[in-house]
Image (cartoon, rainbow, N blue to C red):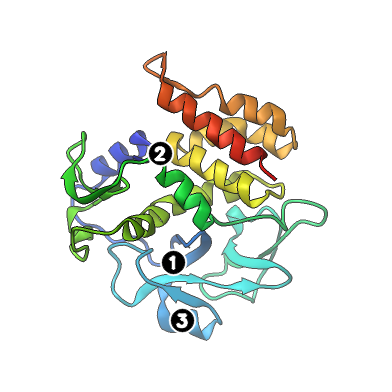
Amino acid sequence: MPYLGSILCAVLAISSTTLAAVNGPCTANGVPGICIATAACKSGGGKSASGFCPNDPNDIKCCTKACGSGGTCRFTSSCTGSSQAGLCPGPANFQCCTPKSGGGGGGATGLSSNGVSFIAGFEGFRANFYTDAAGVKTIGYGHACQPASSCNNIKAPITEKEGKDLLAKDAARFVSCVNSEIDVPLTQNQFDALVSFSFNLGCGTLKNIAPNLNAKKFSAATTQMKKYVNAGGVPLAGLIRRRNAEVDLFNKP
């Protein structure tokens, strides 16, 4: 399952059904966006995607837009390149982010289908609903139904493809972590490996290796990655296998 600490925090935060903030950030299939009305998205030249602004009204969807020269619309706080106003739908701080000159752009920015399958290979698949160790209703490749009503539209049993679609949505926030923390171009394999690493360990752990990545000290970074194999102070064979596979994927051309 995704980072357990994040799950427990989410459980504690949900004392009642709440709405995700309109004009708040979202990620649709690995692309950063904003939760706004479909009409506002369309008028600003964007594309609306359903299912990425949970618990919001039906008309509020995740709006994404390509802009400028190889840029995407995103919040200025997460742009590691150059921001330009007036090209994106939504509030003033949602602007066109284009790559830095000489670095920080031009690489992969989303999780590939191969990356989804890579992560799925380490997550057990369950076609029917079950209750996980934390008491959360779960299905597929560890997709947690938070709140439980968020899975009302899922008809079990599901197929592995449907499970991977849910997994891709669950991985979206870790895609955002990689895009936010890493400001050098990454190959698709490098990006997929880092999303898997973050999905398993959390965004905070990615921050620990980000300095080496951003300095392009990739050998040092992958050496760091291989150290995260303990649970309760004891190395686990499954984590060793996953870290080795992630490093192998990162180093694959």
Q: Position of residue 153 (x, y in %)?
A: 21, 66
- Answer above or below: position of 165 versus 88: above
Check disc 2 and give the amino acid type. Answer: Phe
Q: Residue at x 48, y 28 (%)?
A: 241
SS state under label 2? loop
* Residue 235 occupies quadrant: top left
Q: Residue at x 55, y 36 (%)?
A: 246
Q: Position of residue 192 (x, y in %)?
A: 56, 47
- In which quadrant is the C terminus drawn? top right
SS state under label 3? helix
Check disc 3 and give the amino acid type. Answer: Ala
Check disc 1 and give the amino acid type. Answer: Asn
Q: Are there few (<14), some (14-19), or many (20+) residues within 10 Å of tag 3?
A: some
The numbered disc on residue 122 is 2
> On the rendered structure, is 221 left or right of 163?
right
> On the rendered structure, is 244 left or right of 3?
right
> On the rendered structure, is 78 left or right of 42?
right
Q: Are there few (<14), some (14-19), or many (20+) residues within 10 Å of tag 1?
A: some
Q: Are there few (<14), some (14-19), or many (20+) residues within 10 Å of tag 2?
A: some
SS state under label 1? loop
- Answer above or below: position of 159 versus 60: above
In the picture of the structure, the residue carrying the numbered disc 1 is: 23
In the picture of the structure, the residue carrying the numbered disc 3 is: 40
Q: Position of residue 54 (x, y in %)?
A: 31, 62
**Mark in the foreground, 2 or 3:** 2
* Residue 89 occupies quadrant: bottom right
- Answer above or below: position of 77 versus 182: below
